[in-house]
Image (cartoon, rainbow, N blue to C red):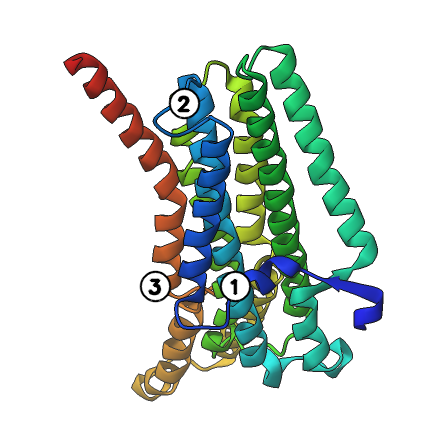
Amino acid sequence: MAPGQSWHVGLTRLVPSVRGGRWLLGILIFGLLWGFFVLAGVLGPSSQAGTSTRSAAWFFSVVIAYIIPVFHYISERTVQAIDRLAPDLAPAEGPVAAIRSRVYWKPRRWFVTVLAGGAGAALAHNTALAFRGGFDRNLANGLAIMTGSTLTWVVLTLVIFALIDNARLFNRLARRVRLNPLNPERLHPFALVAVLSTLALVGAQAAFPILIFDATDAISFLPGLVATMVPMFVLAVLPVWPLHVRLRAAKRELLADVNARISLSPQGGIGDVVALAPLLTWRREVAALPDWPFDTGIVGRLVLYLIIPPLTWVGAALIQHVVETLI
């Protein structure tokens, strides 16, 4: 897509091109947001803000400082996955350079829709909090939290929909990529993108205990929790589902072929058994072929990522219970 018809996802350009640039950006973002909330009187030794207000400020600072560097990392690995798939991509998909550019460049209409959606979600959430008394009575504190909430909604919405758009790109490629069920390793880039795309939202979910256990109302955290949880599972499946369908169909075709050969083979004497042995071995190998483009390591990481948030929530709840008991 030509740059004149699209806009760059500028979040990835914030990372400096130096060693450890993502870490540096994360620390810088956290420091800037922390300083903003200190100046607003939400954090710091002189803060008079309530516990839930301070927790919200910490949550916004952590999530934004985390999500932007991780999004840069995932985008970079997504481009590398496209390069690995290049030899097996159909010519109808167009030049590989154009496919790679879609990771960073999105249509202008897409940008307007996504940013409007993020701002609308922020407005709806802030309005609901205001009506339910979810903001600090101090005007400066309330405005600071409203600003942090809006920034978080907009950034997360941009990241989530950019990842979904990339997952849709891989979903389309998965329908036409050259498929050899006997060599599933060449399809692992699809699985890698699916797993890494969940990472951004898993990390955001792991930060929710900062907000949950000091919240005065579920409206403070539930919309954000749902907005990250549902796309997390979509991102895990969308890039690989067409491959699962194609691999399963190819496997059935191979099994049908070998079973037909076995049924046509004579099965009388010892010589016939010897002749059948390669076919039986081949059938066993075909039956063991995977239906998904995952290897054991990728599956292990996916499972680990998916259990991190609930383990974090349970751990935070236990720690809070122990502290309250001791006090």
Question: Hey, what amino acid is under mark 3?
Answer: Gly
Q: In what element is the residue under mark 3?
A: helix
The dot on residue 15 is: 1
Q: Position of residue 151 (x, y in %)?
A: 61, 39
Residue at 73% across, 82% down: 95
Vertical order, 297 against 162 (above or below): below
Secondary structure of residue under mark 2: loop
How many marks the image carries: the answer is 3
Marks 2, 3: nearer the viewer: 2
Mark 1 / mark 3, whichever is N-terminal = 1
Farthest residue to the left: give it: 326
User: Regarding mark 1 in the picture, which secondary structure is present there?
Assistant: loop
- Residue 244 quadrant: bottom right
Q: Is residue 292 visible?
A: no
Instruction: Determine the image quadrant of residue 22.
Output: bottom left
List x then y, in percent, for residue 153: 62, 38
Amino acid on which the number 1 mark rests in the picture: Val
Amino acid type for the residue under numbered disc 2: Ser
Image quadrant occupied by the C terminus: top left
Find disc 2 in the rendering and name its residue: 47
Measure the alpha-carbon separation of dots 2 and 3: 47 Å
Answer with left or right where residue 97 lies relative to residue 4: left
CA–CA distance in space, label 1 to label 2: 32 Å
Question: Would residue 190 be found to the left or right of residue 154 on screen?
Answer: left
